[in-house]
Amino acid sequence: MAREKFQTLTEQMFYILLCLRQEQCGADIMARVDALTAGRVAVGPGTLYNLLESFLQAGMIRETKVEGRKRSYVLTPVGQAALEEEYRRLLRVATDYEACTGTERQEP
Amino acid sequence: MRNTKREWIAFSFYDFAGIAAHLETMAARGWMLERIGALGWQYRRTEPAAVRFSVTYFAQASEFDPAPSENETVLQDYCAEAGWELVTRSAQMQIFCTHAQSAVPIETDAAVQLQNIHRAMKKNYLPGQVILLLLSLFQLGMQVQQFHSRPVDFFTAPTSLFLVPCWLVVLLLCSLELSSYFRWRRRAVDAAQRSRTLALPRSHYRLQRWALAVVGLGLGCWLWSLRSRREVLFAAASILWMALLIFLVNFLKSLLKRKRVSAAVNRAVTLGSCFLLSFVLMGAVVFGVVRLSRLGALDDHPPAETYEWHGMTWEVYHDALPLTVEDLMDTDYPGYSTVAEEAGTALMWRREYAQEHRLGDTGAPEVHYEIVETDLPALLDLALKEYLSKAERHSDPDAPNSWEGVPAEAWQAERAFRFQRGDTPENVYLVCWPDRLAQIRFNWEPTPAQMALAATRLKAA
């Protein structure tokens, strides 16, 4: 059911999971995503909180430590698989685009 | 110059955008939201400023929480990290503000936001609306049942006529709120899937204000229509009872929150006290009214004299009647009690009259009659049906009651009936004129001349 729910990841889900390949405190994720995408993708604090809760429930991340109100998380194998699956899906999308338009892959 | 002010705006609970926009307008006018309480939204005066507001929901929160839960504070920390400061919280709703116009919005994923709102709505708001909807249907059902079975009682009782529009307003508002929410949700789910944007909900606060005005007007009309001192006192006590109940329950809830009592205990104590207090306060109201009544303080209609019979005291009244036994025949009986009572609304009036001899005295002629008056022919038809069917309802199977049609000319009426028990006609008549009907009971067989005189008096009463 969890896989079904996260079959296709939104950009925000994708980048949150990407950040959590290394242990990360929840509050730092927003800044990390911003830096990683040069401000292209913004994750609001409400969205971040709810997505982290959903990922936890789906077993895609796990809580590593709690320091006061500061909680840190890291990706689980389930989350890693979801991230890789999304990466492959995006690659397929890009490949299809290239095949159809005859363009070669460019640096973003 | 006042530095605080309150307002009551009936935004829908899920109208996050409408609430935020309203708070931004208020802040631009120099009024900053301070808190949301039982008595409305409280603002404090500040310098007018361009402040951004954001309304978000936390489904696990409860209005009984003594303080934000650990999870809720984690969310608040994330918001603080993004530049959003908590203004206030009320049940599952949290209101944040920021002076940074470039701050990242609290919600950046329409689907996640929608899911979150729905979780919060399912916690209290939707069940509350459904319960209120069912309660209004039940109350209206009771009124409809009374309307069908006892239309005269229904249309002559100011309370019934007040309750029906009130419960209709509740039904309308709950239906509108629920249907609007589910229609918005369907639209929002579509929009979130198609364009990852969130369709904005819309509150019906103007309609709610009108509804409140209708209820207020109905309440005013109801109080104005109450005639006896007892009814007025009972109505005033009931309103006081309601206000006191709301105040005490809210006070207790706030006190327990201040004492840091857990949400579960607070909920149980508050709900239990609400249940208990409603009985205790209603009991106090009834006790007070009965006590005052026994002391005679509520007696609008004191007896003219009393007499003893079989060890009990009986009351004698000397009310003026439109038709008396003396009008119809010569009688020298001196001990009559004449009672006149009336009740009604703008739609229908019922007047009941009786001229009775004292208990123990026999042989004196008596007359009892009641007149139902209305300007609406349809209501008169309903009243006639009720009187005709009432006789059958209280019928003895061995001698069934019935109303037999009799010539109406004798009564100068459109229709006239005579009551019959089995095959025996009794001296009880039901007479219909264009704007009224009357049921008259004689304890003798009236002559045509007496009927004609009675008709003249009752038509003019």
Image (cartoon, rainbow, N blue to C red):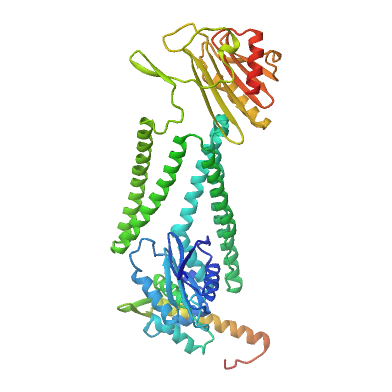
Depth order, front residue of B155/B115: B155
Residue B447 shown left or right of residue A7 in the figure:
right
Relative to B388, say whether B15 is above or below. Answer: below
Of residues A101 and A45, which is closer to you in this image?
A45
What's the residue at 35%, 17% (across, down)? B312
Q: Count all numbered tags in the image, as a single digit.
A: 0
Q: Residue at x 36, y 73 (%)?
A: B73
Which residue corresponds to the image point at 36% horizontal and 76% vertical from the top-left?
A62
Q: Is residue B181 left or right of residue B294?
A: right
The location of residue B267, given as percent across then percent down, is 34, 56
* Left or right for B107, reference B409: left
Question: Where's residue B450, x and y in %?
Answer: 63, 10
- Residue B129 visible at all: yes
Q: Which residue reaches farthest bottom?
A: A107
Q: Is residue B418 above or below residue B237?
A: above
Estimate the x, y position of residue B90 in percent, counting from the top left. Answer: 42, 65
